[in-house]
Amino acid sequence: YSFKYVNGHPKNHCVGLPTVMAFGVLADVATGLPVLLSELTLTTALRTAATSVMVARRLARPDSRVMALIGNGAQSEFQALAFHHLLGIRELRLYDIDPTATAKLMRHLAGTPGLALTACTSVADAVRGADIVTTVTADKTNATILTPDLVEPGMHINGVGGDCPGKTELHPGVLAQARVVVEYEPQSRVEGDVQQMPADFPVTEFWRVLAGQAPGRQSPEQVTVFDSVGFALEDFSALRLLRDLSQQLGLGAPLDLIPPLADPKNLFAELGLSGQRQAA
């Protein structure tokens, strides 16, 4: 089993810190012994992008080649490269309210074979003609990054930034006209973009699509939304992969978090105070 510590502070860049910082622990179920302590800041970005592509393989049109990327901050490169290498995206249309963020993203991706980059002047400019729209913004507000008038038939929307109560990116009208897929419905209704919708608004948990219990994309014209919030199972899977890879590649180092006890029933002896008079 595992746990993850993660924060979300959009103003951290003002003090030289990342918006998201995370670490996690993987432990043996039989004994509770921690077997892996790992950073999860980079890993969170990687597993989020991987999950986005996994869902898009079932929900986006197979001929999707153009993606709009709205929000060009810390997670944008991971999303861009995942969709390029794993889904065949050939053109990225980029927009951020901060032009320096877009410039940073373009520097990092310049020279990527088979990937064209276009800096756009607005959300509307970026999404026009896009097959897939990824929104990955950081501001903790009920925002409306994408409105119904910008949605085109057959579009797949990968909504990543709406991930806590009071933080959304999609206009309710976008959700109302789309087939919405989530990771875990009880969590998504509190943290995802669907927090804006009535309690009976229909959503599909993605595991049902993978298991063949629910369809993926149903027609070329269908509008689909992945309301991504991040789910514990993704972090658990990432930690297991990190453990396996660290063992295979000889990475990592032992860390003395748990004292090696000569007698597991005698913890006090580890202080080396036996026989000494203790102050009251």
Image (cartoon, rainbow, N blue to C red):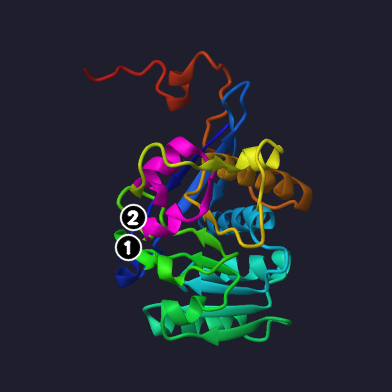
Question: Considering depth in this image, is 24 or 272 the residue closer to the camera?
Answer: 24
Residue beneath disc 2: 167
Quarter the C terminus occupies: top left
Neighbor class of circle 1 (other Cα within 10 Å; few <14, some 14-19, many 20+) is some
Above-or-below relation of 145 to 103? above
Above-or-below relation of 129 to 164? below
Q: CA distance from mark 2 to mark 1?
A: 7 Å
- Type of the residue with mark 1: Ala
The single residue placed furthest to the left in the displayed view is 280
Residue 145 in view in this figure: yes
Residue 119, horizontal then vertical, whole percent: 50, 86
Query: Is 108 on the left-hand or right-hand side of 19?
Result: right
The circle on residue 179 is: none
Quarter the N terminus occupies: top right
* Nearer to us: label 2 or label 1: 1
Q: Is residue 188 magenta?
A: yes
Residue 98, horizontal then vertical, whole percent: 37, 80
Q: Secondary structure at mark 2?
A: loop
Residue at (57%, 39%) from the top-left corner? Answer: 233
Residue at (40%, 52%) from the top-left corner? Answer: 193
Q: Which residues are magenta?
A: 171-195
Question: Considering depth in this image, is 219 or 185 the residue closer to the camera?
Answer: 219
Mark 2 vs 1, N-terminal side: 1
Neighbor class of circle 2 (other Cα within 10 Å; few <14, some 14-19, many 20+) is many
Residue at (62%, 28%) from the top-left corner? Answer: 28
Query: Is 99 on the left-hand or right-hand side of 250?
Result: left
The single residue placed furthest to the right in the displayed view is 248
Question: Considering depth in this image, is 267 or 216 the residue closer to the camera?
Answer: 216
- Type of the residue with mark 2: Lys
The reply to whether callout 2 and callout 1 are in contact (CB within 8 Å) is yes
Q: Image quadrant of residue 271? A: top left
